[in-house]
Structures are given as C-alpha cells and as structure tokens.
C-alpha cells in the first residue's frame, strides 16, 4: 500500500505546526526521540530510512550506543524536585548514565552546569562518547541551593542499537546532483535545531513539485557529526562524482541577520552561487570563512573529502546569545518571517542553479559566425556591439565559468548572457557540461 504523504501549504502556519510537534521531543544522536522526529518528517517527505549499527567503525569514529531515558531529577533536602527532565529535557546532560545516589551540596555542584552570564538560561550539554552524568540548571536556581543532602535520580539505559538517517533522491534530467543536508539530533532548541529540518522539509516538497529539473537533488536528515561521518563513509565516492552544489542547513530561523559560511576551498560553484544570489537580492550579510566552521560542513569540506558544501544561515551558530540554551525558542529567537525568508533565499538558489549552466565551446579558435547567420551582412554600430558581446561571452565558455561567472566578469545582465548562451547552444557552438 502506497504511503500517504501529508500536504504542505506554503504559509507561515506550516512552520508553526511543525515546530509545535517537534519542539518538545527529547532528541539525541541515537535514540527514540531522534527516530520519532525522523518519522514525523517522513510523513511530509517520502524518504528512505537507512541504518548503521552501534559499534560500526566509520572512518576514525565508532557509532555509539542508543540512549533511552525514562526520568531524571534531583530531590532537595526539603524533598522538592528540581532539574526535572520531564519539565524541560535540557535539564539532563545528554547521554547521562543511570544514577541513584545521595550527595552533599558541594558534591552535587560539581555535576551542575549553569551560565553565570545568562542567569535565567538552562544550558545544553552532552557527553556522547564518554560515560558521564550531570544536570543543567539556571544560575539563579543554582544560587538558591542550600546545604544538605540531595538525592540524584537518573533512569537511563545505553544499549546497542541503530543510527538512523533519512534520504531522498529527487531525480532530474541529469545525474549531476545538488546536495542538501540538515541535522535533527538536538532536543528543545528552536533555531539551532528545528529551523533547519523545517525549512528543508518545505524546500524538498517544493523541489519535488518542480517540472523539468536539470539537476537531481539528494536530501538527507542526519544526526550531527557522527551522522555526516557515517554517511560519507559509504557515499563519498558517489558524492565526489556527482555533486555540483551542496548546502548544509542550520540556524535559519531568526530574523536578525544573514550569514554565509564558505567552503574550505572558498571558490566552489556553491560559494560563487551564494554570493551571486545574496547580492542579487540585495541581502546584507556577514561572510565567514573556513576557520569559522562549526557544523557538518566540517566533515563535508574536510581534506580528502572536499565537497562543495556551504551554508546560508541567519545569525551564525554560536553567535547569538540564546544559542545552546533554553532561551532558543519559537517566537523569541525563531520567527515565521525569519523561516520564510530563509526558505525563499534557498528557493532562489535552486532557481539559479537550474539556470546557471557551465557552457563549453565545441570549436577551437573563433567559430565562423556568418555561415550560421549569427553575423550581420551589414555592420552597424549597434550590431557591432551585439556581436562583440556575443564573442566576449563565447570567449569565457571554457567549461569552468558559469553563466553567473560570465555575467559578473563582463558586467552584463544574467538574463542577457543566458539568452546568448542558449543561442550559441542552439547553433551547436557550445555544450553544457553540468
């Protein structure tokens, strides 16, 4: 029986609805919350789910065990529960081992994480690859703790399981691909977590509806770091052969700034495309080079991997005060306006990719334009300028410059360049290599 896919309507309500469903779920890199989130997204996009077993070696890493949590809290000397996981899943340090013990206040405070400069915020802390435990608490609440004996209860389990990821390949006329990746492994964080999957879900649905696509589109939903490493361990050869453009979607929900994080190379087709689109749309943005990397682009652009992956973000991860805290919420940090603007910019990138061919001449030296009726019988000042522009454009059709590159170098409108390039292709003077 064919799976029924939920419809997505292009309006602000979709983003709010998806946030309401995803936000409360306790996610980690492996576990029930992650799988539940993946299942919710698969109701909107019919992607396949693939699995890596715990203990599998992926390059220099090993897929960790699954983590299940039933409860976690601290009982004060006054018999009051604090740091309750069930009230806010950020209270428990991610991947904490099971604990049931009595501690003094001094002993307990060694296991408490807070942010003195943000006294009302609960921080987000994890320990994925080393057995540990701890609680996260606001600085204001930490200061209220009194001397005495505290009971710590953490009911968790680690076991061999599976690392899951979702993937969909939307086929176009070409086997050359545009790659889009996002992660779904953080708990209740709006901008740093749910904004990326929400926008990419929206975008994937739109891409799938587009007719006559030149490119194929490979879209993945993974846990951060270990997910991209595991994915690359079995797909790198295919990606290096087929990928022409790549994007990592993260922190795309606020309405404050735009940021562009370059690839390690800094001059890939994706880098050039992003700068072109942001400039075309008169977007004021801040550029960050490779030294400011911080998400899965670290893996996609690593030496030897060298994929053309960049990011368009709103405020970059780590640079907004609510980052990795309980203050990262829908309505405060993330807005429907911010999400929609990010969606539209990525949509614009896809539209430009579909137009932004790389032309290459089929003829050595200048072609004989007259026999193709591309050279006027009578030369005038106006016709001479048009022919000059055509020949200038042709001189850059070397298989390395895209339409956008040629437009930029010749200071011509892309629409005009594309019109001339189509004319040259129709007359079999050039071909497209991508």
Image (cartoon, rainbow, N blue to C red):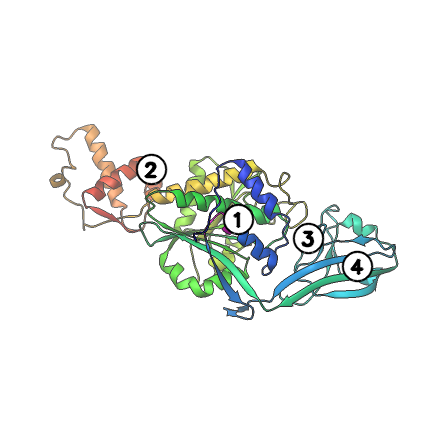
Residue under label 2, please give it.
414
Q: Is residue 249 magenta?
A: no
263 vs 31, left or right, is left
Given this view, does label 2 or label 3 mark the residue nearer the observer?
Answer: 3
Residue depicted at x 36% and y 57%: 242
User: Which callout, 2 or 1, points at the residue further toward the start of the chain?
Assistant: 1
* Residue 28 visible in the snapshot: no
Which type of secondary structure does the marked residue at label 3 adopt? helix
Q: Residues within 10 Å of mark 4 (few under 14, many from 20)?
A: some
Given this view, does label 3 or label 4 mark the residue nearer the observer?
Answer: 3
Given this view, does label 2 or label 4 mark the residue nearer the observer?
Answer: 4
Distance CA(mark 2)–CA(mark 3):
50 Å
User: Which callout, 4 or 1, points at the residue further toward the start of the chain?
Assistant: 4
Residue depicted at x 54% and y 36%: 12
Given residues 37 and 372, the one toward you in this image is 37
Q: Please give the label number shown on residue 197.
A: 1
User: Which callout, 3 or 1, points at the residue further toward the start of the chain?
Assistant: 3
Q: Residues within 10 Å of mark 1 (few under 14, many from 20)?
A: many
Q: Residues within 10 Å of mark 3 (few under 14, many from 20)?
A: many
* Residue 206 visible in the snapshot: yes
Given residues 404 and 188, the one toward you in this image is 188
Looking at the magenta stretch, what is its main secondary structure? Answer: loop
User: Which callout, 2 or 3, points at the residue further toward the start of the chain?
Assistant: 3
20 vs 413, left or right, is right
Given residues 331 and 72, the one toward you in this image is 72
Distance CA(mark 2)–CA(mark 4):
61 Å
User: Which callout, 2 or 4, points at the residue further toward the start of the chain?
Assistant: 4
Residue under label 3, please give it.
89
Return the x and y of residue 206 as percentages of the image width and height. 43, 42
**From which residue to which does the magenta span run?**
42-46
């Amino acid at each position: 029986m064919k799976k029924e896919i939920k419809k997505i309507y292009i309006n602000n309500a979709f983003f709010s609805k998806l946030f309401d469903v995803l936000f409360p779920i306790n996610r980690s890199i492996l576990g029930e919350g992650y799988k539940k989130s993946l299942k919710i997204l698969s109701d909107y996009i019919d992607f396949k789910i693939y699995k890596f077993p715990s203990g599998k070696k992926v390059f220099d890493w090993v897929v960790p065990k699954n983590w299940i949590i039933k409860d976690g809290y601290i009982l004060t000397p006054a018999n009051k529960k604090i740091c309750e996981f069930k009230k806010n899943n950020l209270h428990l340090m991610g991947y904490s081992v099971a604990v049931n013990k009595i501690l003094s206040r001094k002993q307990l405070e060694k296991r408490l994480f807070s942010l003195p400069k943000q006294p009302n915020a609960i921080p987000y802390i994890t320990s994925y690859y080393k057995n540990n435990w701890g609680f996260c608490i606001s600085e204001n609440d930490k200061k209220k703790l009194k001397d005495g004996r505290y009971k710590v209860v953490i009911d968790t389990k680690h076991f061999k399981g599976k690392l899951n990821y979702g993937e969909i390949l939307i086929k176009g006329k070409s086997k050359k691909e545009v790659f889009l990746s996002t992660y779904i492994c953080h708990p209740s964080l709006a901008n740093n977590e749910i904004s990326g999957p929400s926008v990419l879900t929206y975008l994937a649905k739109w891409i799938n509806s587009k007719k006559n696509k030149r490119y194929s589109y490979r879209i993945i939903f993974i846990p951060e770091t270990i997910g991209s490493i595991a994915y690359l361990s079995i797909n790198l050869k295919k990606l290096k052969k087929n990928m022409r453009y790549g994007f990592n979607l993260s922190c795309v929900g606020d309405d404050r700034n735009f940021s562009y994080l370059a690839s390690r190379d800094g001059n890939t087709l994706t880098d050039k495309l992003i700068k072109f689109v942001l400039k075309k749309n008169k977007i004021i943005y801040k550029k960050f080079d490779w030294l400011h990397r911080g998400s899965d682009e670290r893996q996609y652009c690593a030496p030897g991997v060298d994929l053309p992956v960049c990011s368009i973000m709103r405020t970059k991860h780590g640079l907004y005060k609510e980052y990795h805290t309980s203050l990262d919420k829908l309505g405060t940090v993330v807005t429907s306006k911010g999400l929609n603007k990010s969606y539209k910019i990525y949509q614009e990138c896809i539209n430009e990719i579909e137009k932004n061919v790389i032309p290459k001449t089929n003829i050595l030296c200048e072609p004989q334009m007259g026999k193709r009726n591309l050279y006027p019988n009578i030369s005038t000042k106006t016709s001479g300028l048009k022919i000059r522009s055509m020949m200038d454009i042709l001189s850059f059709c070397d298989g390395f410059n895209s339409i956008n590159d040629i437009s930029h170098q010749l200071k011509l409108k892309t629409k005009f360049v594309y019109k001339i390039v189509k004319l040259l292709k129709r007359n079999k003077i050039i071909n497209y290599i991508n």
